[in-house]
Amino acid sequence: MCKWYPVCPMKTFYERGVLDKHWIEQFCFGNYGRCIRYQMEESGKPHPDNMLPDGSINAKLPKTTQ
């Protein structure tokens, strides 16, 4: 499991039912090293909450989870 998963917006979106399970399975519990969000967190680069693990932006998701 990705070490960032507990605080990642992807977890929140999935739990709210607005994010498909495949994102969590393929990235958060799968090969998280290829997750763009993970890479950006590790390098300290800012990124929006609605950025998916593949780096694309999903405008249907909120920009922040607050």
Image (cartoon, rainbow, N blue to C red):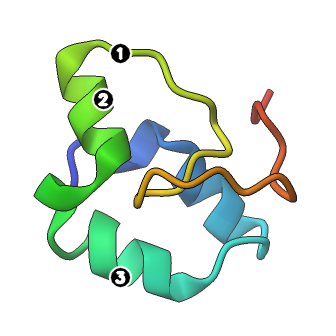
| Residue 63 placement, left or right of 44 | right
Q: Is residue 18 visible?
A: yes
What residue sits 87% from the left and 59% below the top?
Answer: 60
Residue type, numbered disc 2: Met
- Secondary structure under tag 1 reads loop
What residue sits 78% from the left and 35% below the top?
Answer: 63
Measure how far apart labels 3 and 1 are at the Cα level.
24 Å
Which of discs 3 and 1 lies nearer the camera? The answer is: 1
Which residue is nearer to you in this view: 35 or 7? 35
The residue carrying mark 1 is 45
**Marking on residue 25:** 3
The residue carrying mark 2 is 40
Earlier residue among tags 3 and 1 = 3
Quadrant of res 66:
top right
Which residue is nearer to you in this view: 55 or 4? 55
Earlier residue among tags 1 and 2 = 2
